[in-house]
């Protein structure tokens, strides 16, 4: 969500869905992504490709990659073949390595006016 909003120069997820708004507590992340895709589209952009790297010790994402791509593609309004999802380990280092959380890095390529 942040990657596509940022690529379009439309702020970030915290501006669109502030954590201070009770309506956003427990909100489904795919709903937020769909709303961001809609906002980017209204601004005259189309998503062409998304690359996501999830850094976590568990779960191992390699066996879920195709499921994630097939779920994200329609929400992003692109062919799932243009969605890349990779899992990486932090090799046991730091808070990610201890399993206390995970991190995600995403890049989006857009087409259209800017």
Image: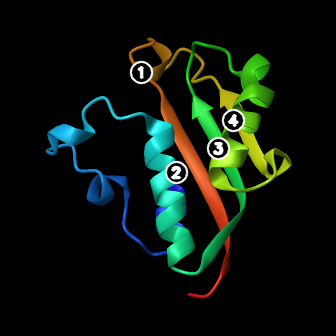
Would you call the spot at circle 4 few (<14 residues within 10 Å), some (14-19), or many (20 or more)? some
Image vertical order of residue 98 relative to residue 88, above or below:
above
Would you call the spot at circle 3 few (<14 residues within 10 Å), some (14-19), or many (20 or more)? some
Would you call the spot at circle 2 few (<14 residues within 10 Å), some (14-19), or many (20 or more)? some
Would you call the spot at circle 1 few (<14 residues within 10 Å), some (14-19), or many (20 or more)? few
The first of marks 2 and 3 along the sequence is: 2
Q: On the image, numbered disc 1 is attached to which residue?
A: 101
The first of marks 4 and 3 along the sequence is: 3
Query: At x 57% / y 15%, what residue is drawn?
Result: 57
Q: Between residue 85 and residue 33, name the one nearer to us.
A: 33
Q: Compute the Cα span from label 4 to label 3.
A: 14 Å
Q: On the image, numbered disc 2 is attached to which residue?
A: 34
**At which x and y percent is residue 8?**
52, 73
Q: On the image, numbered disc 3 is attached to which residue?
A: 52
Q: On the image, numbered disc 4 is attached to which residue?
A: 71
Q: Compute the Cα span from label 1 to label 4.
A: 23 Å
Query: Can the viewer see residue 24 in this picture?
Result: yes
């Amino acid at each position: 969500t942040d990657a596509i909003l940022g690529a379009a120069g439309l702020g970030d997820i915290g501006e669109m869905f502030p954590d201070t708004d009770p309506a956003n507590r427990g909100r489904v992340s795919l709903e937020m992504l769909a709303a961001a895709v809609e906002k980017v589209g209204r601004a005259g952009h189309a998503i062409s490709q998304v690359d996501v790297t999830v850094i976590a010790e568990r779960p191992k994402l390699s066996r879920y990659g195709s499921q994630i791509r097939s779920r994200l593609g329609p929400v992003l309004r692109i062919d799932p073949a243009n969605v890349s999802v990779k899992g990486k380990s932090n090799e046991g280092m730091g808070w990610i390595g201890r399993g206390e959380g995970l991190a995600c890095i995403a890049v989006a390529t857009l087409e259209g006016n800017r």
